[in-house]
Image: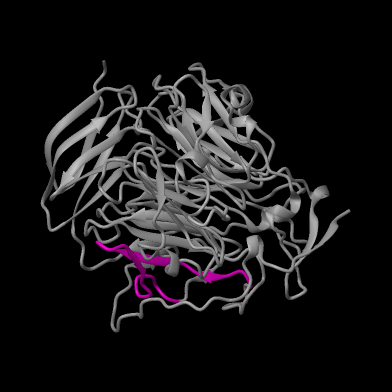
Amino acid sequence: MRRVVFLSIILCGCGEELQETPMPAAKDFTPWLVDEAKQRGVDFTWISGGTGTFNMPEITGGGAAMLDYDNDGDLDLYFVQGGHLGSTQTESNVLLRNEDGNFIDVTAQSNTGDTGYGMGIAVGDFNNDSFVDIYITNVGQNVLLKNNGDGTFEDVTEHAGVGDEGWGASTAFADFDNDGDLDLYATNYLVWSEGLELECFNPKGLLDYCSPTNYMAPARDLLYRNNGDGTFTDVSESAGIGSRLGTGLGVLCNDYTGDGFIDIFVANDGMADQLWMNNNDWTFTDVAPLRGCALDDEGQAKAGMGLTSADFDADGDFDILVCNLFGESDSLHRNDGSFFTDITASKGIRTSTRHATRFGLGWVDFNNDGFFDIFEANGKVQQIGSPKTSDPFAEENYVLLGNEQGWQRDMASLQTHLIHTSRAAVFGDVNGDGAIDVLVINRDAPAYLLMNRTTEQGNFVVLDVKDQYGKPALGSIVTATVGNSTIAFPVHSTWSFMAANDPKVYIGLGDEKSIKDIKVLWTDGTTTTYDSFDQGFHILQQQVQ
């Protein structure tokens, strides 16, 4: 039986409608990002299964990935499907193979059609056979699909020991002990079941989705150590991860402390965020409160959802951007070495990002001018405000253009009339032109495939960084000098929200013709240096020791 909860405020205290002041759209402006999903054979809708009972998972998913599962050099697409809670599923996940920029459904022959109520996804080669594998989080049992290298996958969940049955959200492969194989981290959102669902009412008196704080049921995240034999060991408790409960929705795995070991940043919904510092001995310590990135600059915990990371200030370490709920701005945590500083307001992000509920998030250089832009996939979690379509949760997505001073929202960068309830945003170059495209998952509406049609593109370098096994060298760090700036770039795929992105390193050059003084710091601590690379595509592979 449901308990009834009356909400006098929106999640985490957000109430009245805000007035936004975006940049005006330029006349006769060709949008940078244009939806070409239908033309390219992408026909996918994440099905919430909502029946008016407002079960919490219905408003949260779902995820997707850009991956090269067949090692042919282009990016394929994998979609995690929802469906109907508590019933026998007919809907399944979907794998689309890229054929010259168009997509063919190969789900059936590839055996990738998991029918769980899907949330997030991670992509990585856990067994070092040079073919990337897929890990899926569900409301219910998570699933590990091993790539057989012949276009098919095998469900090895039970054998591998990674079939947690909680409410999974974002997840990531990473080499936490620098031993050459990929371990696994998985967030859990809430301890939830249909029998524990609540009845919540919004300020309009309408039955609506609850806040996570109504449940008082944070969950334990999971950390799995790769045993090197196709199996994993759950080390969450011994590593310290299990000592702290949270409402994890987003996760980043990068070296934020500069000691050569990968740390874990978790965005929690309505709770303090966590920065799990890797102690280099299979234990982790949450140092977010000490390093100033657990809360915002006013000491408040926000509704953390999507997140991303970059060295936007060219000081050699990785800064963190977290997106949040309507009424709360994003949080920009500048990494100052031993401490993070919240500089959201000074960079223009506070005033530009409070007018929607943001989930998918990317810090990418769309026009290759050398400045990171911001993309945000938006959609409400309650029926508040004035609906812009028949979907009461629908909101426009955002693009914030980057410059030397910071970021400002631009209304002209996105094709108009794209208004749905968006969740995951996935980033990569689908058609191989050096410009980053975006895949956006929408709740109960067709996904967008936003092709980058920016007409005034700068020069670029794309680095495909591979380890000695030929797989993406996740966790490695590339530093390169562009003009007068030396910038660090992480090799990573898990960022945004419930998404697995293209792990290649994209470097916008502006008017520059090349990068120089390139160094790759591999996860085993060794380095490889290169003098320079001209604009274009380059493969960097670690040599066998």
Q: In which quarter of the image is residue 73?
A: top left
Q: Residue furthest right?
A: 1
Q: In this view, does 541 lie to the left or right of 397?
A: left
Q: In which quarter of the image is residue 325?
A: bottom right
Observer able to see residue 269: yes
Residue shown at 49%/45% (left/top)? 106
Dominant SS in magenta: loop
For the image, the number of numbered tags is: 0
Residue shown at 50%/49% (left/top)? 64
Relative vertical location of residue 434 with respect to residue 316 in this rendering, above or below: below
Q: Which residue lies furthest to the bottom in this view?
A: 27
* Percent position of residue 156, x then y: 58, 27
* Quarter containing the C terminus: top left
Whether residue 209 appears in magenta in the rendering, the answer is: no
Q: Quadrant of residue 218?
A: top right
Name the colouring of the figure: one colour
Q: Is residue 59 left or right of residue 252?
A: right
* Percent position of residue 381, x then y: 63, 63
Observer able to see residue 265: no
**Magenta stretch in the rendered image:** 392-416
Residue 357 or residue 195, whichever sits in front: 357
Residue 107 or residue 292, whichever sits in front: 292
* Percent position of residue 235, x then y: 59, 23
Q: Is residue 223 left or right of residue 307?
A: right
* Percent position of residue 256, x then y: 39, 37
Relative vertical location of residue 482 with respect to residue 159 in this rendering, above or below: below
Residue 312 or residue 504, whichever sits in front: 312
Q: Is residue 228 left or right of residue 54?
A: left
